[in-house]
Image: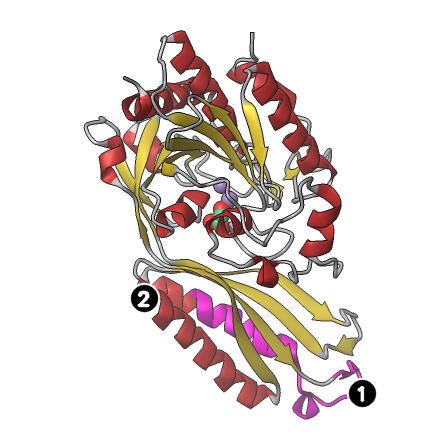
Amino acid sequence: MPDDLEQMWADLAPVGRSAVSGGYFRQPFLDAERELAAWFVEQAAARGLAVETDGFGNQVAWWGPPDHDAVLTGSHLDSVLDGGAYDGPLGVVSAFAALDLLRERGVVPRRRVGVAAFVEEEGSRFGQACLGSRLATGAISWETARALRDRDGVALGDVVEGVVEGVVEGGSSTLLAGVSAYVELHVEQGRDLVDRGEPVGVASEIWPHGRWRLDVTGEANHAGSTRMEDRSDPMLTYAMTALAANKRARLTGQRATFGRVEVTPNGTNAIASRVTAWLDARASTDQALADLVATVERQAVERAGRDGTSVALTAESVSAAVAFDPALTAGRPWPVLPTQAGHDAGILSAAGIPSAMLFVRNPTGVSHSPAEHAETADCLAGVVALADVLEGLVGR
Ligand code: GLV
Ligand code: MN
Ligand code: MN
């Protein structure tokens, strides 16, 4: 008997969990996340599913006739820094549970069904959101990706080649060959379903979004003996840019966040020589996103002129608007919601694979934080919903 949803959840609960915050640190190719990758292989084995791993570390557990096209479900097992338990793992656990339910129902699949776990969805270590699915679809080349470095300067190429078996042959993945649909279940990252009193929803679209690195260069000097009018302080340029981004996003109904900043040399009694900060920007249309980022950049440059600093804004990963395929969930009773969060389903959709997402109610409405939550009853409703969609796609 394979583990049921509650048992799978109990198995995952301690992995990578901080005793201090209760949040999760499951960064790609480090111990906790590798433990989850091994757990994935065990769960597949318990169900008699064949696991395929590409050279980047993406995993798929396959069920059904191998010579047919495939429907994929699943999500990711990595987390943001100090993240919640549900963002990612709920989709993988629910995928295994939905497959069990299909078997209980006696469904004999006429197409293959794959349970997927994509690596580095959050971009928390190498900076690129949805890195695994971008590599699997060819949206980013291995030549580019292998040079990405983590905060300690370790290159992705060196990490992957040491950890994943079957190193990247020819720089590409064949994992998605024959995949003709993808359905990802995810914890909701807002309060829409709570407000509607519904346990399950379906996604209509993903807002365009991206990450930009802001490098501000100034002049290091003494915090006491340097007169205020003689400074080139990059901290000021950064602080004013963060305020300007927030204001612009509020005024236009978009989103702009600086959640990460690195200060050099980061001393209390010295003016910084350099500040690097990351802008996460999201907007309802591609044009609105371009306008938002252009405005932030213009304001940063203007401010740098006054501070005697210099700035550069560099795009690190940008995703255009995604519209999910309504045919995959047609006729279902669930409310339809847009999302401002990025997902592997968006990357597969952009690569031409018809994709859909289901959301499970999150009573706190909080995500990317230890406060993220979903009740077991709602998770089980999500499993039934996912099984229903999959049955419609692969059942006879
Ligand atoms: C991923 O969850 C993102 O939206 O950044
Ligand atoms: Mn996330
Ligand atoms: Mn996610």
Residue 211 located left or right of residue 38:
left
Say which of 37 and 178 sits in front. 178
Q: Amino acid at mark 2?
A: Ala
Residue on which disc 1 sits: 225
Residue ID at (51%, 49%): 130
Q: Quadrant of the C terminus?
A: top left
Of tags 1 and 2, which is closer to the observer? Answer: 2
Residue 137 covered by magenta stretch: no
Instruction: Please provide percent x and percent y for residue 165.
Output: 69, 39
Residue ID at (59%, 53%): 170
Say which of 359 and 41 sits in front. 41
Residue 132 located left or right of residue 248:
right
The image shows a total of numbered marks equal to 2
Residue ID at (21%, 31%): 330
Q: Earlier in the sequence, mark 1 or mark 2?
A: 1
Instruction: Please provide percent x and percent y for residue 309.
Output: 62, 86
Quadrant for residue 108, please give it.
Answer: top left
Mark 2 surroundings: few (<14), some (14-19) or many (≥20) residues within 10 A: some
What's drawn in magenta, residue-wise?
220-246
Residue 118 located left or right of residue 229:
left
Residue on which disc 2 sits: 288
Instruction: Please provide percent x and percent y for residue 344.
Output: 45, 44
